[in-house]
Image (cartoon, helix red, strand yellow):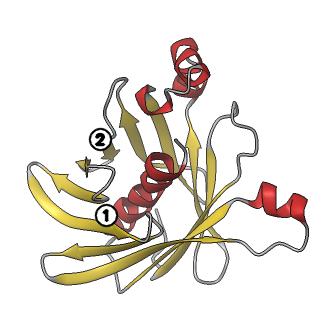
Amino acid sequence: MLHPSTYYTLQTETIMTHQSKQYSISDNENQRAATFEEDSSSSGNWLNHALQLFNLKQMTSLHIKLLSAKQEVIAHIHRKKGLTSDVSIQTADATFDLRFKGSISQKIIAESAGETLFEVNGKNMASDFEVKSGDTQIATIQKRSIPAPTTKEAWLSGDIYHVRGSEWTEEQAILLLCTTLMIDLTYHHK
């Protein structure tokens, strides 16, 4: 469902803070590969709006769908209300967990049924991440600003995430994209 690539970019398409979150994902040929879209069950929830009003975004629940280029659901990302950054990712075949280990250490662990699939370690104020499976580096995730010719475009364009690596399975690609999204929501939209 997600066509293979060794390079993806992820960029927010949401301009207003009260809108549902939406991110576009492009491949190495700059073709749209997928989209992240927040479900109305979390974006329209009145308690989530109240928590955001008091600047408690990290306590809100979250339900985001990963959609293919043909708008088919590939995966669901769920986070429960409360003081947690950990999320559950459900695909058609399996369930995965992303565990965040401290905001200062910037370490994320992807697990399935208690088995560690990969670890993500951040540096440079959560701008650069290295993804390792055992001792093997399988990807890098980098947050960069988009150069814009005008101040207005710079304000509205946001940042772009580059996910680079070697050949991935579809499962690994989905987990890497979900991890990149959660890096943005956890470390950069507080």
State the residue position of label 2: 86
Q: CA distance from mark 1 to mark 2?
A: 19 Å
Q: Is residue 156 left or right of residue 64?
A: right
Q: Quadrant of residue 137?
A: bottom left
Q: Is residue 72 placed above or below 140 in the rendered structure?
A: above
Q: Residue at x 60, y 50 (%)?
A: 71
Drawn side of residue 61 relative to residue 89, left or right? right
Residue bearing mark 1 = 171
Kind of element beneath mark 2: loop
> Is residue 143 or residue 112 the one in the foreground?
143
Q: Amino acid at mark 1?
A: Glu
Q: Disc 1 on helix, strand or loop?
A: helix
For residue 168, which quarter of the picture? bottom left
- Horizontal relation, residue 145 to residue 133: left or right: right
Q: Relative to residue 90, is residue 32 depicted above or below?
A: below
Q: Is residue 145 above or below residue 37?
A: below
Sequence-wise first label, 1 or 2: 2
The image shows residue 34 at horizontal and vertical percentages of: 57, 60
Three-letter amino acid code at disc 2? Answer: Asp
Q: Residue at x 48, y 68 (%)?
A: 127
Position of residue 10 relative to residue 89, above or below, is below
